[in-house]
Image (tube, rainbow, N blue to C red):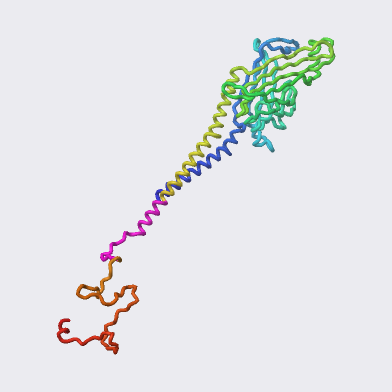
Amino acid sequence: MKHRAIGAVLFGGGVLLLALAAGLVFVVKPAMTKLPYDLKPTTSVAEAKGATFLQITNGNVEINQADLKSTVLVSPNPKATSELTGDLDGKAVVWEVGQTVDRTDRKELINAYGAALALDRVSGSALEWEKEYLDDSGTRQDVNFSGQMYKFPFNTEKKTYEIFDRDLRAKRPAEFKGTEDIQGIEAYRFEQVIADETLDLAPDRLAVLLPKLAPGATSGELKYSNTRTVWIDPVTGSFLNVREVQRKTLVPNTGAPVDVLNADFAYNEETIKGSVERAKDSRNSLNLLGVYAPVGAALLGLVLILAGLLVGRQGATVAAGEARHRAEPAPVADPTPTRVDQEPVRDDTPTAEQPRTEPAGGVLSDEIPPASTNWKGDDSSVPHQRPSTDDEAEKR
């Protein structure tokens, strides 16, 4: 009974561990491969050395050259996320994004923008949301965000994705170009090329630029090019490094084109290091709860199940032996054993004085010995009993 109880406990523990392993794989890991609601704000800094840029100060328009620093702050908005309804409820998170571009030598602000958008928790792509906006001119504008912006999908694939471009207000393809090592992580490199596309330029802003940059021109276009390269951690979909080679050129209807921006922005070392550390931490958590823990629990569960079966079987064997021992008492010795190979003792056994004259009747003999009677027969061949005398009677 004790063995059976131990076997049942081991077997039950093994089953529970297998159930735990399945729960980690099918419940916990999928929950971890989603953007969390309590994500901490992150800051990324990109620098452009010797950039050419347009600077407007107190109505004065100048084309300057200096180092620029772009700072992007991404902050989750839990309140707005909790207010999502319909298809977005439980599927999306709301992020608020702010960017500033500063001239580093004078600590002067060159431009800035703000935005709010809803992101799919799994794919990281922007979703349609009624309260999304973009403000890069001092006024919030309605915009339809789409594609990848600040996050790629968990388990990013080696394929083409579409990245939303803030200047174009639209998404453009980013092709997979290969893998590179970024401080110990094999990153996927994607490249998006935007070549000489025309940007919308408000008439009042054009009116400010033309007199200074293209005297005599009455109209013009703003051409935009950008080669955007992003290095993505394929496990978490997070950005490890970003580089943007941007160029914006004012093309007047009269006169030579003028670059209003020519800059090569790239993450600085501190930003890359922080991005890699966050990605490694997320990877370790995913591997621990999504791989190592389920495998370990499954193996231990199988061991316990086998041990439970073996212990239970041993208990059954012992119980069966004890039952046989109780049911089969030891045999008692017969005080008068019988020899089956001993010849039966007969009264007519022949001796030297009296040899046998008649066939011996055995157990399987057809011969019947004559009966001893007190009658006579007429047949002389049949011996008849003679009367006994007194002397013989006394001897008997």
Judge by depth and name the residue closer to the eye, 156 or 371: 371
Judge by depth and name the residue closer to the eye, 190 or 62: 190
284 shown above or below 311: above
- Residue 186, image quadrant: top right
Percent position of residue 23, x then y: 55, 40
Judge by depth and name the residue closer to the eye, 356 or 345: 356
Percent position of residue 210, x then y: 81, 13
- Residue 125, image quadrant: top right
376 shown above or below 109: below
Please check the rendered image and state whether residue 86 is part of the magenta-colored stretch, yes or no.
no
The residue at 77%/19% (across/down) is 196
Percent position of residue 42, x then y: 61, 24
Regarding residue 80, the answer to whether it shows in the image is no
Q: Quadrant of the C terminus?
A: bottom left
Percent position of residue 30, x then y: 60, 36
User: Seen in the image, is 294 located left or right of residue 312?
Assistant: right
318 shown above or below 392: above
Callout count: 0
The residue at 61%/17% (across/down) is 268
Please check the rendered image and state whether residue 325 is part of the magenta-colored stretch, yes or no.
yes
- Residue 87, image quadrant: top right
Regarding residue 395, the answer to whether it shows in the image is yes
User: Seen in the image, is 316 located left or right of residue 52?
Assistant: left
Q: Start and end of the magenta stretch? A: 316-339
Judge by depth and name the residue closer to the eye, 23 or 113: 23
From this viewpoint, which residue is outermost toward the bottom? 378
User: Seen in the image, is 187 located left or right of residue 351?
Assistant: right
The residue at 36%/59% (across/down) is 327
